[in-house]
Image: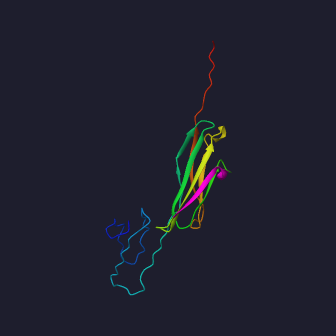
């Protein structure tokens, strides 16, 4: 689980059976292939897949009516820039967001960052706000959702 032979071992696989999927925690894996000489052939085949997904912060939106909330949806380590859309109660509010694409030349990857500034309205209470990530490697968009929970102000009149 890393770039060198000193990294944690994620598995050792033998025989003719296809091994299960192996998941790394970084964007690199050190692979050592050793043949037992039992069969002659052209080598082995490796499939590498990176799952692109958006991370939203904060994960819970709380506030009062009129409060300006700032949320961030970040997609990291993608080989092409991602497209981020914000959906609130079925309505596209991406126009309230600012998108930034940050190239990481060292890893030949991109960070796509979308910052949403949204003023809370009474209708937002209890609604779900979704960051929808589209990317060429995804068959379907990746959706991350947070809940909006608003404070309620009570007006109480006391007899004088």
Number of numbered markers: 0
Residue 150 x/y as whole percent: 59, 37
Residue displayed at 38% across by 71% down: 30
Instruction: Decide which of 150, 95 is in the foreground and name it.
Output: 95
- Tell me the quarter of the picture where residue 26 sits: bottom left
Q: Which residues are magenta?
A: 92-103
Give how far across and how far down residue 10 sits, in percent: 37, 66
Quadrant the N terminus occupies: bottom left
* Snapshot quadrant of residue 41: bottom left
- Residue at the image position 59 percent from the left and 67 percent from the top: 136
Residue 81 position within the rendered picture, expressed as x and y whole percent measured from the top left: 57, 64
What residue occupies the far top of the structure in this picture? 160
- In the rendered view, tell whether residue 32 sits above or below residue 121: below
* Residue 62 on the magenta span: no
Q: Position of residue 159 (x, y in %)?
A: 63, 14
Location of the C terminus (image quadrant): top right
Please name the predominant secondary structure of the magenta segment in the image: strand
Q: Is residue 64 above or below residue 131?
A: above
């Amino acid at each position: 689980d890393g770039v060198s032979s000193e990294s944690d071992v994620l598995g050792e696989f033998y025989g003719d059976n296809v091994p299960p999927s192996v998941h790394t925690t970084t964007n690199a894996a050190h692979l050592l292939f050793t043949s037992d000489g039992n069969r002659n052939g052209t080598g082995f085949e490796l499939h590498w897949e990176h799952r692109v997904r958006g991370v939203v912060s904060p994960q819970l939106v709380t506030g009062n009516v009129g409060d300006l909330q700032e949320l961030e949806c970040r997609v990291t380590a993608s080989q092409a820039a991602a497209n981020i859309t914000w959906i609130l109660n079925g309505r596209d509010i991406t126009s309230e967001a600012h998108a930034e694409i940050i190239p990481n030349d060292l890893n030949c990857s991109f960070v796509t960052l979308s910052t949403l500034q949204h003023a809370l309205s009474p209708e937002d209470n209890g609604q779900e706000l979704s960051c929808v990530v589209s990317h060429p490697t995804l068959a379907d968009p990746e959706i991350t959702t947070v809940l909006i929970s608003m404070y309620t102000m009570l007006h109480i009149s006391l007899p004088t």
